[in-house]
Image: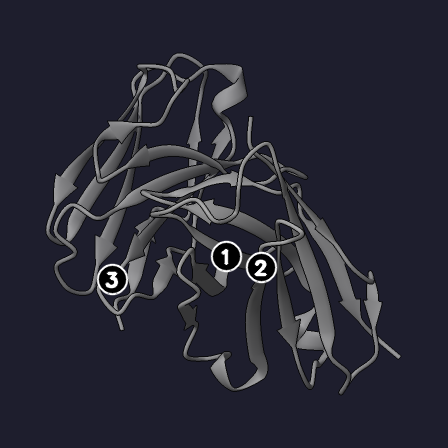
Amino acid sequence: EIVLTQSPATLSLSPGERATLSCRASQSVGSYLVWYQQKPGQAPRLLIHEAFNRATGIPARFSGSGSGTDFTLTISSLEPEDFAVYYCQHRDNWPTWTFGQGTKVEIK
Amino acid sequence: QLQLQESGPGLVKPSETLSLTCTVSGGSISSSRYYWGWIRQPPGKGLEWIANIYYSGSTYYNPSLKSRVTISVDTSKNQFSLRLSSVTAADTAVYFCGRYYSGFDPWGQGTLVTVSS
């Protein structure tokens, strides 16, 4: 079973700053890594699929990178609406689906 | 635009079976290539995948829940359903349904299910 570990648990930043979120897999997942954003009281929203492909309607300030075991979600310049919890997720070949534990991006 | 909506009881007694339905509108649940699934989120905690069903009818379960979970589809109603047996307080969560291709998208709004006597 693949385990996804996200870091840090909480990221305290100001609007306009750059956010760098990490997701590490316990074994190689190739490029099969997905990122979601979740705001309080809402369902998660798909941001990035297959490590670096932005979903429809997602602003260009969101970018994904990485392959194998180490992945990064970068928000180039935080907007007020970007303060939320971010989850990574992987689907393996079995298939089963796994989520990371989340990173909260909060206003400093 | 595809939309998903969860429905079912908001309160379930311990040891009983939780049953939820996800109604799909704006598209066919029989469309090829897609998985349809359930994800839950205990209050204040992270996301946990429960089960998926492929358009062909194949089912996939979280190993930690497999003995208690059944996912099924009713193509005539454009719905899919979740049954979770022998529930305890640990099953209290917001339950989301979603469509999966390269990621879960879209999601339903979620429904809170509380397990309590």
Image depth: mark 1 or mark 2 in front: 1
User: Could you give the CA–CA distance between mark 1 and mark 3, rounded to whole angstroms?
Assistant: 15 Å
Say which residue appears at 30% left-offset and 54% top-offset. A90
Image depth: mark 3 or mark 2 in front: 3
- Quadrant position of the N terminus of chain A in the picture: bottom left
> Is residue A5 or residue B76 the one in the foreground?
B76
Image depth: mark 1 or mark 3 in front: 1
Quarter of the rendering containing residue A77: top left
Q: Position of residue A43 (x, y in %)?
A: 59, 40
The answer to whether marks 1 and 2 sit on the same chain is yes
Q: Position of residue A106 (x, y in %)?
A: 50, 32
- Please give the label number shown on residue A92: 3
Kind of residue at badge 1: Gly
Label 1 marks a residue whose chain is: B
> Is residue B34 or residue A26 the one in the foreground?
B34
Asked if residue B43 can be seen in this view, the reply is no
Total numbered labels: 3
* Element under disc 1: strand
Q: Residue furthest front?
A: B76
The answer to whether marks 1 and 3 sit on the same chain is no
Kind of residue at badge 3: Asp
> Is residue B69 or residue A34 the one in the foreground?
B69
- Please give the label number shown on residue B40: 2
- Please give the label number shown on residue B5: none
